[in-house]
C-alpha cells in the first residue's frame, strides 16, 4: 500500500564535501608524519701506498665459530670446558703449526648467527694465551 501517492521517492546520494575533507586531513597527516632521509656521502681521497708487499707471511691461527657453538682451530674441531682450556688448545695448535716462537695472528671467523659470548670466549682465550694480534674475517658483499 502506498499512502504517499503524490510524493516521489528521492534517490540517495553521497555527499562528496565531507568525503573530500576527510581525505584532505589524511593527506596532510601523511605529509607531516613522513620522514625524508637524505643520504650524505663523504668525498674522500684515500692515500696510496708504494711499499713492497711483505715477503714473509705471519703465522695465522684461523679460529672458526659457528652458530651451534662449535669451535675449530685451523680446521680441527676443539672441545673445551673453560676459556683457559681453549687458550691451551690455541697454544697447542700454534706449536703444532710451527709458529717458531713468534706470536701468531688470531683470525676469528664467526658465523653471523653465533652468539656474542662465543666470540668473547675466543678473544679472552687469545689474551690468556698471550696472543696480542687478533683480527676478524668478514665476507665482502656481492656487487649491486
Image (cartoon, rainbow, N blue to C red):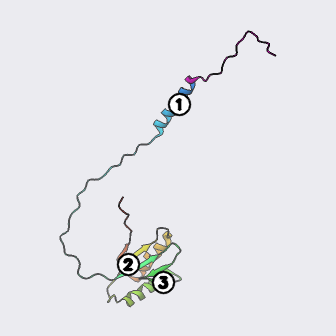
Which of marks 2 and 3 precedes in the sequence?
3
Q: Residue at x 76, y 10 (%)?
A: 5
Disc 3 and disc 2: Cα gap in Å? Answer: 16 Å
Between tags 3 and 2, which lies in front?
3
| Residue range highlighted in magenta | 1-17
Between tags 1 and 3, which lies in front?
1
Q: Residues within 10 Å of mark 1 (few under 14, many from 20)?
A: few
User: Residue 49 magenta-drawn?
Assistant: no
User: Residue 10 magenta-drawn?
Assistant: yes
Q: Residues within 10 Å of mark 2 (few under 14, many from 20)?
A: many
Q: Is residue 144 above or below residue 127?
A: above
Task: Identify residue for label 3.
Answer: 77
Which of marks 1 and 2 precedes in the sequence?
1
Per the rendering, the mark at residue 49 is none
Task: Identify residue for label 2.
Answer: 106
Q: Secondary structure at mark 3?
A: strand
Of 64 and 15, the residue lying toward us: 15
Per the rendering, the mark at residue 23 is 1
Q: Horizontal and vertical percent for residue 126?
A: 41, 79
Amino acid at each position: 500500500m502506498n499512502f504517499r501517492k503524490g510524493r516521489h521517492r528521492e534517490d540517495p546520494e553521497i555527499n562528496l564535501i565531507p568525503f573530500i575533507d576527510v581525505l584532505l586531513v589524511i593527506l596532510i597527516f601523511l605529509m607531516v608524519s613522513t620522514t625524508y632521509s637524505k643520504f650524505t656521502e663523504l668525498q674522500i681521497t684515500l692515500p696510496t701506498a708504494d711499499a713492497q708487499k711483505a715477503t714473509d707471511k705471519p703465522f695465522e691461527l684461523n679460529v672458526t665459530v659457528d652458530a651451534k657453538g662449535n669451535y675449530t682451530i685451523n680446521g680441527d674441531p676443539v672441545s673445551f670446558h673453560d676459556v683457559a682450556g681453549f687458550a691451551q688448545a690455541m697454544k697447542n695448535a700454534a706449536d703444532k703449526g710451527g709458529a717458531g716462537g713468534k706470536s701468531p695472528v688470531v683470525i676469528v671467523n664467526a658465523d653471523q648467527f653465533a652468539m656474542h659470548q662465543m666470540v668473547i670466549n675466543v678473544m679472552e682465550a687469545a689474551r690468556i694465551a698471550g696472543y696480542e694480534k687478533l683480527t676478524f674475517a668478514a665476507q665482502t658483499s656481492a656487487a649491486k
